[in-house]
Structure formats: C-alpha cells, structure tokens
C-alpha cells in the first residue's frame, strides 16, 4: 500500500479547484477533517481526484447531510492504494478506528437478549444477558424471538447439566448439592460430583450446540454412546441417548421449513423506509436459524438507490469475532461489490468463503426472509422524528410557517344531547397536556356539527385574546370541507388568525385553504401518521369527557323527580330516547318497550312529562 507523502490539502479558499487537481487519479482513501483535525468522514475511491471533486460539483439534493459536512470541512488527507480492494480494507479499518460523525456506523442492536457462557470461570454457567462486555465470556445472539431463546436455554441446561448457582467454584470443601442435582439438571460441581475436565467437556459441547454445529455434535455423541455400551456402561449410554434426543428436539424447534438441513450461511436483507434503511442479518448453522441482528441507518446516509457501502459488511465481520460460514447471501439491490468483499474475507480469515446473490430457489427465499425481518424491524423500531414530520406537513399543505404548535378540535355527542367538544395541543409533535381543554356546547341545539365547531373555535381564540396568549400555528379540525369551512368562518373575526386544516376520518384526506386540491397521503407517510395521531388523541379526549358528562346526567335527571321513576328507570328512558325532549315526543306504545313500563305507567309518565 502506498502512503503518499504530500497527502494533506486545505480545502478552504479560492484555490480549491487547483488543489483538487493535484489529487492522484489512483484508488485510495480520503479523510475529511474539521478545524480541529478530527476526521468527520472517511471514504474510498477508485479515482481519488474525481471522487473528491464530485463533493463540490454535485448538488447532493438526495443527501442533505453533505452540505452540512462541507461547512465543517477544513482539510482533506488522502492515502493512495494499489487497488480498490486495498482501499476498501483501509476504509473499513479507519472507520472502525476513528468512528467519523458522517460515516454510516454499524451499531449492534442491544435491545434483544444474548446467551452468555462464562468460559472465564472454572465451572462456567449459561446466562441470559442484554449487554455484551469484554469479560472473557462467549456470547451468542442477539435473539429476536425471546421465548424461543429461553426455551433453547432451558434445553441446553437440561442437556449439558450446567449449574445455575453463582457460587465461586471450586469451594474449599464440598457441600451437599442442591435439588437441581437430585432432579438430574446439574452435574453437581459444588459437591465434587464431576471433575473440572469433564465439566469443561460439557461446556465445549454446549458451545457447539449454541453455535449451530449440532450435526457434528450428534455424530460424536452417537460414537460415545456406542463406546459406553460396548464397555457395559449402560447408565452413561442411556444419558448420552437422552442428550441426543433432546438436541434433536431442540433443533426441530428452530428448523426452518426449507430443504437446507446442512446449510451454513449468513443472510443479509435490506428494507427501505421513508427516512431509514434497515439491514437484517440471519445466521443459519446446520440449517438452523440460531440468531439474528438488525441495524438501522438514516436514509440520507444509506440510500439504496445511489450508495455503495461495502465497508458495512467489512465492519460487521471485523466487529464480531466469531465463526464465518462458507456462504454469505446478499440481496442484489444492496450495492455491495461481491467480488471485492469475497476477496477480502478470504484473505482476512484464510478460508474459502462465497458471496452469493441468489435469484431463485431456497437461498433466494432466505433473502426474502431476511428482507421481511428488516421490514418488520424498520416498522417497529425506526425512531420517530417529529420535527421532520412537521416539516413534511408544512411542505405538503403549503403552510407559510412551521407548525410548531398544533391545536386539534373534535365534537362528541349522542343524538341532540350531551354534546361536548375536546381540544388538545401538540408542541413540536408532542402532546402538551397542560393545554388540553374541554367544552360544553352552549349556543347550538340539535345536531349541527358545523355550528358547534364554529362555537368552540371562537371560544378558544377569544380566550387566548383575553389572556393575551399567542395563537397556535395550526388548527386541525376533525372532519371534511364542511367542518373546515365552519372553523374558517370563525377565524374571520380575529386578527392574524392561525392557519387551519382538517382531516376527514374515513378517507383520511387532508384539506387546507393553502392548497388547491385535497391531499391524499400513503398510509405509511410520516406526516399522515402525525395528523392521525393528533386526531386520535383529540377524539379520545373528547369522547372521555362526553362519557363523564353523560354518566353524571344519567345518575340524576329531572325524570327522577317524577312519581314512580327512580334512577334505574330514568337511565333506561334516557338510553332509549336520548333526551327528555325526545321522550316527551314519544307515544305510550314506544314507552312500554322499556323494561318495567306497562300501558298504565307509560300513560301516567306522559301525563307527568306534560307538566314539566
């Protein structure tokens, strides 16, 4: 590898084009640094001069972070290499060493548990942990299916009879073994029932079991069982037979329903969301899916349509000191350079490793499985960016200002009575519950939702004026054009009123005076999810208040003052007719349909109602 002596270039100033022209046209790595000399981005190139020049020529509309990076850029170092493979290896090692801010960093998922074998102890244990530390232990995982992982751990302890206690073994003197020994679930090292060497043999078998090398383990156990039988050690032979059966049972629980019973491979799958890209890795050993990992990247850092990040795979295998399988399956849309990665892996691990891009058959099904895992993880774990969602909403609705504060309104009623409204406030996409408000409708009779909406919006803005408080940036109305127009009319009486939009429930269509046509967004669009979340919250708040008010009115009403009408009958009448007004309009034939009313009591009720 050639390290050029004059490899520092200051990129600030008018002489920039001439400075870049002095870059070599050979393969290599460029290191972008800020004013303090800290690397902020490291990349590889087939042609260093052309690659670095592209940063200052292209618009980078699809990678918004690049202009921000260039603002911090003070100097560029470069290192020339003999070929692209060397450049890739150097890039991966430099990224690993410096962890530049603008590089895609491969961060392992620490949410899911691992199985830990404490091989640094004299008598190792099998533990479930959620953090990997450099303590000399051996880790397996992470396991996304926690229940399957715990089931497998239980099988492993039963098969290999490892201890569960945390005693510091060996003890100065043997003690009476615990109940696990009596139940055949522990080999009793605390009581000296097994030698350290024999216990270590069981641990080695456990590691092979967790590593997925179970076919080899079963073959070896069969040999041990036959030898024990020939030596008339029938109890030991029976124990080995039981171990074999348990291993087969545990393996069936993990067996993927494909004809890949002996395959050893790592399978990579990619899924692309609105703002993030997810890389999933499935580890198959002897046809068993033993573990999986998921990695999340910002889409502006890894866009599948225009980015090549071979160093991601290199980082993965550099960061994980573990068995590398014979085959690595990658999707054809990843942009990975299979030839370069294969050459590096074979050189690094001194073994014959194949990089495959399967197009059909079972291996292609495994790619689809990995892609499905990536998509599910992306949907579940992609971090929510409220500011970006609000910017999207501003752009979609053509709003002249950023909607930092949004207040949403909803009407809740039952027939012509018990009509209330709710208002919630979201600040920077987060509920601000101290500003939630509830309203009883005062000026509107009947079911005129438009007039009710106009009343509530008017009352809210008048109160803000009285308090000399700032108006929200955007009002979000639950409903279609009718509700939007009613609320818009209410805004006309105020100076500098807030912006307004509405979301129709069934069609999930956005309406706003700022756009000429209704806006339909895909179900997965972040801006749509944001307004739906706000709409659902105000609906929940309004209906909770409605139920509270309705419950209070059911508990006591004017009906309970009538002769022969108690609380229970009053509740049944109001539930049936909705209001005293409608009950007055009902005939005695309709009233007798309510439990507890006869013709006589129904006619008597009508008479009493007439006197109210």
Image (cartoon, grey):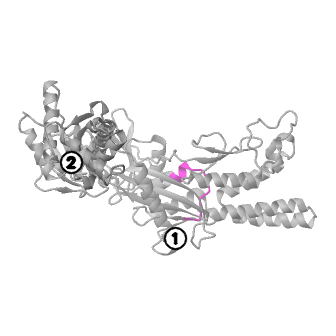
Circle 2 residues within 10 Å: few <14, some 14–19, many ≥20: some
> Viewed as shown, does residue 265 lie left or right of 218?
left
**Pointer 2 residue:** 582
* Residue that sits furthest to the right in the current view: 232
Q: Identify the residue shown where x is 76% and y is 36%.
A: 167
Marks 1 and 2, the one that precedes in the sequence: 1
Q: Secondary structure at mark 1?
A: helix
Residue 409 in view: no
Mark nearest the camera among 1 and 2 is 2
Residue 177 at x, y percent in the picture = 84, 41
Q: Quadrant of residue 611?
A: top left
- Tally the marks: 2
Disc number at residue 363? 1
Q: Identify the residue shown where x is 47% and y is 46%.
A: 107
In this view of the protein, which residue sits in the foreground, 549 or 354? 549
> Viewed as shown, does residue 255 lie left or right of 549?
right
Q: Is residue 508 above or below residue 39?
A: below
> What separation in Å lies between label 1 and label 2 (alpha carbons)?
69 Å
> Viewed as shown, does residue 181 lie left or right of 21?
right
Please say whether residue 251 is one of the residues in the magenta stretch.
Answer: no
Q: Identify the residue shown where x is 57% and y is 51%.
A: 146
Q: Secondary structure at mark 2?
A: helix
In this view of the protein, which residue sits in the foreground, 472 or 20? 472
In this view of the protein, which residue sits in the foreground, 332 or 85? 332
Residue 383 at x, y percent in the picture = 38, 45
Residue 321 in view: yes
In this view of the protein, which residue sits in the foreground, 31 or 590? 590
Magenta stretch: give its range: 316-327
């Amino acid at each position: 590898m050639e390290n050029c002596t004059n490899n520092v270039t200051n990129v600030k100033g008018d002489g920039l084009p001439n400075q870049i022209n002095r870059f070599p046209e050979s393969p290599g790595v460029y290191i972008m640094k800020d004013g303090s000399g800290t690397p902020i981005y490291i990349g590889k190139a087939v042609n260093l001069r052309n690659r670095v020049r592209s940063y200052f020529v292209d618009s980078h509309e699809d990678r918004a972070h690049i202009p921000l990076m260039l603002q911090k850029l003070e100097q560029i170092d470069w290192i020339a290499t003999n070929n692209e493979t060397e450049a890739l290896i150097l890039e991966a090692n430099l990224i690993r060493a410096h962890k530049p801010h603008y590089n895609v960093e491969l961060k392992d998922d620490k949410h899911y548990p691992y199985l830990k074998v404490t091989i640094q102890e004299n008598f190792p244990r099998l533990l479930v942990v959620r953090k990997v530390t450099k303590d000399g232990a051996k880790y397996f995982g992470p396991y996304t299916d926690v229940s399957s992982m715990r089931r497998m751990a239980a099988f492993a302890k039963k098969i290999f009879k490892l201890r569960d206690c945390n005693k510091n073994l060996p003890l100065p003197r043997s003690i009476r073994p615990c109940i696990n020994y009596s139940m055949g679930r522990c080999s009793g090292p605390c009581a000296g029932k097994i030698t350290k060497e024999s216990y270590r043999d069981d641990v080695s078998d456990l590691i092979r079991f967790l590593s997925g090398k179970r076919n080899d383990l079963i073959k070896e156990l069969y040999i041990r069982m036959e030898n024990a039988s020939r030596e008339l050690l029938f109890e030991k032979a029976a124990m080995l037979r039981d171990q074999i059966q348990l291993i087969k049972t545990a393996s069936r629980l993990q067996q993927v329903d494909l004809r890949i019973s002996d395959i050893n491979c790592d399978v990579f799958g990619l899924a692309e969301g609105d703002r993030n890209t997810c890389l999933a890795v499935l580890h198959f050993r002897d046809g068993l899916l033993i573990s999986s990992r998921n990695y999340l990247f910002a889409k502006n850092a890894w866009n599948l349509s225009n980015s090549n990040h071979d160093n991601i795979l290199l980082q993965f295998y550099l960061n994980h000191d573990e068995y590398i399988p014979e085959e690595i399956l990658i999707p054809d849309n990843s942009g990975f350079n299979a030839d370069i990665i294969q050459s590096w892996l074979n050189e690094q691990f001194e073994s014959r490793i194949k990089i495959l891009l399967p197009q059909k058959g079972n291996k292609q099904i495994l790619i689809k499985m990995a892609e499905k895992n990536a998509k599910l993880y992306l949907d579940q774990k992609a971090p929510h960016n409220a500011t970006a969602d609000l910017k999207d909403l501003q752009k979609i609705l053509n709003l002249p200002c950023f909607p930092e504060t949004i207040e949403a309104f909803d009407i809740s009623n039952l027939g012509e009575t018990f009509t209330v409204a709710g208002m919630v406030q979201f600040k920077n996409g987060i509920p601000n519950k101290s500003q939630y408000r509830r309203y009883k409708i005062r000026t509107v009779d009947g079911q005129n939702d438009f007039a009710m909406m106009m009343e509530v919006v008017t009352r809210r803005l008048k109160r803000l004026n009285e308090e000399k408080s700032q108006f929200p940036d955007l009002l979000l109305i639950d409903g279609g054009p009718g509700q939007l127009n009613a609320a818009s009319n209410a805004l006309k009486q105020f100076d500098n009123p807030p912006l307004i939009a509405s979301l129709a429930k069934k069609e999930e269509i956005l309406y706003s005076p700022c756009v000429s046509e209704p806006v339909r967004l895909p179900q997965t669009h972040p801006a749509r999810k944001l307004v739906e979340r706000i709409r659902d919250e105000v609906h929940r708040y309004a209906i909770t208040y409605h139920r509270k008010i309705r419950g209070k009115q059911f508990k006591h009403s004017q009906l309970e003052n009538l002769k022969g009408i108690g609380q229970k009958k009053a509740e049944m009448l109001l539930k049936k007719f909705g209001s005293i007004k409608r009950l007055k309009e009902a005939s005695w034939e309709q009233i007798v349909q309510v439990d507890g009313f006869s013709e006589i009591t129904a006619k008597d009720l009508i008479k009493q109602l007439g006197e109210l």
